[in-house]
Image: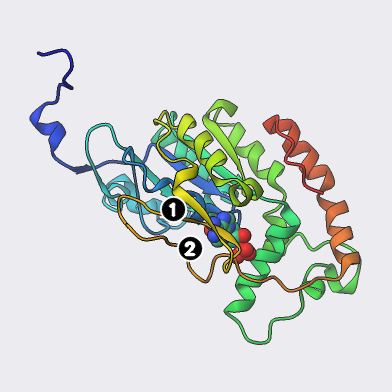
Amino acid sequence: VPPKYKVLRQQDLVASRQLPSALIIGVKKGGTRALLEFMRPHPGIRAAGSEIHFFDHHYSKGFHWYRHRMPTTLEGQITMEKTPSYFVTAEAPRRVHLMNPGMKLIVVVRDPVTRAISDYTQVKSKRIDMPKFEELAFVNGSEVVDTTWSPLRIGMYAKYLERWLNYFPLSQLLFVSGERLISDPALEIARVQDFLGLKRLISEKHFYFNATKGFPCLLKSEQRATPHCLGKNKGRNHPSIDPTVIKRLRDFYRPFNRRFYQLTGIDFGWP
Ligand code: A3P
């Protein structure tokens, strides 16, 4: 074999569907769609288009069902999927581990207070007559934070991370800052490429800041030659929330955030 050429077998040239070897497991409203779409131009990965919900809703359908939801790949390409509810699903760590103990897990996290407001804004956009955030955040008009309300529950990241760490070493998890994914997408995408063992092909050159949308967008990719942003449902305007409510929520999350920084070894700098 001439040494400068790659050696491939005939079967390596045939596209086939594989179970994912990397998952974006959360968090909901953290910036999971942005992360996946910003990684999509990389030729080393192929990702499912929609959220598959295998490890929460469709687990009983089996691995065969799951594999057939995956895009076709060639030898050496990484198959990926993102379903943000996996992070908070009690059974997910055990189920993922059973399927592949070497799975690479990516978690996009964001200040839990902003995340809660983002989550609320999403629900509100689909409902008429939505009570105010300030009313939903506390138990019966008290000052007790309602942790049964999912926009607030999901933000207790440390609690959920502990469950994943029962099954996976920290080295198999990558934490992406949702804030930095907005302020410096190329930096976070470089970290993701390194984590997945991919060449750093996606860089500053791929992004521009769209002043109208107020978010970074893709300038070009192999799939699309024209600039494009995420859809209208990403980067919504948030309602303004009573500052005393914000303060109470910050106080509530502080110990959870500290624990999360301890577990991950990263200070995300949330206020
Ligand atoms: P908002 O719509 O509340 O601003 P997810 O994809 O996990 O549901 O996260 C949605 C959030 O991604 C958005 O929440 C937005 O803040 C964030 N985001 C990060 N980068 C973005 C980008 N380039 N374009 C649009 N939204 C982005």
Residue 93 makes an appearance in the image: no
Mark 2–mark 1 distance (CA, rounded to whole Å): 8 Å
Mark 1 CB near ligand 1 (8 Å cut)? no
Mark 2 CB near ligand 1 (8 Å cut)? yes
Q: Is residue 128 above or below residue 46?
A: below
Looking at this view, name the residue that lies furthest to the bottom. 129
Q: Quadrant of ligand 1?
A: bottom right
Q: Is residue 178 above or below residue 115?
A: above
Q: Return the residue nearer the eye: 250 or 55.
A: 250
Do the CB atoms of the residues marked 2 and 1 lie less than 8 Å apart? Answer: yes
Quadrant in the picture for the N terminus = top left
Residue 20: image x %, image y %? 36, 41
Residue 215: image x %, image y %? 58, 60
Identify the residue shown where x is 28% and y is 50%: 71
Q: Which residue is mark 1?
A: 37
First in sequence: mark 2 vs mark 1: 1
* Left or right: residue 266 compared with residue 249: left
Identify the residue shown where x is 68% and y is 62%: 151
Q: Return the residue nearer the eye: 250 or 38.
A: 38
Residue 176, image quadrant = top right
Res. 230 mark: 2
Residue type at mark 2 is Leu
Q: Is residue 257 above or below residue 195?
A: below
Q: Return the residue nearer the eye: 17 or 77.
A: 77
Could you tell me which secondary element the residue under label 1 belongs to? helix
Res. 63 mark: none
Residue 227, image quadrant = bottom left
